[in-house]
Image (cartoon, coloured by chain):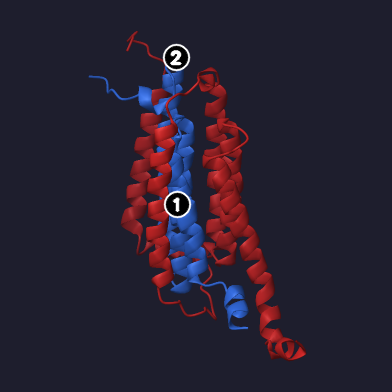
Chain colours: A blue, B red
Amino acid sequence: METFESFLTIGLGHYLTVSVILFCLGVLGLLTRRNLIVVYMSLELMLNAANLALVAFSYFNKSLDGQVVVMLVVTIAAAEVAVGLALIVSLARKKLPVWVNDLNKLKY
Amino acid sequence: MWETLTNYNWENIFSLLPGALVFYVLAGLAILFGILVVANPFSRSPINSGLSLLATVLSLAGMSVLLHAYFLAAVQVIVYAGAVLILFIFVLMLSRKEMKMVFTSTRIRYAVGTVIALALACLLLSIVFQMPAAAPVKEAVDGTVPAIGRLLVTEYLVPFEAISVLLLAAIVGVVHLSKPNTKGESK
């Protein structure tokens, strides 16, 4: 009875577990995939997992600060994706491959 | 048998059931599509990863609604699902040919990546499970537009302005990067 009700009472731990699983999936994608665009998607997954943790903490602490931080994180993520994808587009224009191992040199 | 059934606090359980059901469905969808983003067993195509990421983000927006972060859920749908994912798909269409290259020597990479991710998951989950349970929330603070807007222009004014400068820098950088090369640089 105890276990069944605690199974149904969604607490902070439930949300944090989902967040941790998604974050580690993002880490896995970041380390194993070689396509630069999929690496960016994994980064987005990690940011979203962190956002979920922030929103959950904000809800269970009855404060809105976490949600404001999530707004800022979403903005930063959008800017980061725009710059990263612009880099990918300029690589594609120069007919360079978008695999991370081949992009290990700066200009000089 | 009947004794144990009557022992249950049915009223409490019925009041908890809908919320818990929605949470478990959304969590399952988020994790399922999260797995499909990084390790889709059926296809390696980045476009499938992108669409799975879209589904993950939508599930997470649903969880934000469960946590009374209504404005944030709308922002996640608009910015992530509406802008970022469309950007991903556009770029995929623009660099389509380069996607078809064969990749080699990834087995050790997969092994190392899996070990590191699993170790991190064990570490973080052990911390989560050791944490004392948070008190259940009776009266939640709603994340409505006025409440969050007020916080953004009072307490968080400096980060808010810094973010606007960052966005401007990103715009300038993106325009510079995606401009065709006029000077004829070869490298």
Measured from the top left, where is residue B33 in percent x and y? 59, 47
Residue annotated with mark 2: A95
The answer to which of B50 and B173 lies nearer the viewer is B50
Q: Which of marks 1 and 2 is nearer the N terminus?
A: 1
User: What residue is drawn where x is 43% and y is 44%?
Assistant: B114
Q: How many labels does the image show?
A: 2
> What is the chain letter for disc 1?
A
Residue annotated with mark 1: A23
The answer to which of A105 and B145 lies nearer the viewer is A105
Q: Is residue B152 visible?
A: no
Measured from the top left, where is residue B94 in percent x and y? 54, 22
Measured from the top left, where is residue B71 in percent x and y? 55, 59
Q: Distance between the residues labelled 1 and 2?
A: 33 Å
Measured from the top left, where is residue B8 in percent x and y? 68, 87
Q: Is residue A75 visible?
A: yes
Q: Quadrant of residue A68?
A: bottom left
Say whether residue A29 is left or right of residue B27.
Answer: left
> What is the chain letter for disc 2?
A
Q: What element carries label 1?
A: helix
User: What residue is drawn where x is 63% and y is 70%?
Assistant: B20
Q: Identify the residue at the far right of this view.
A: B2
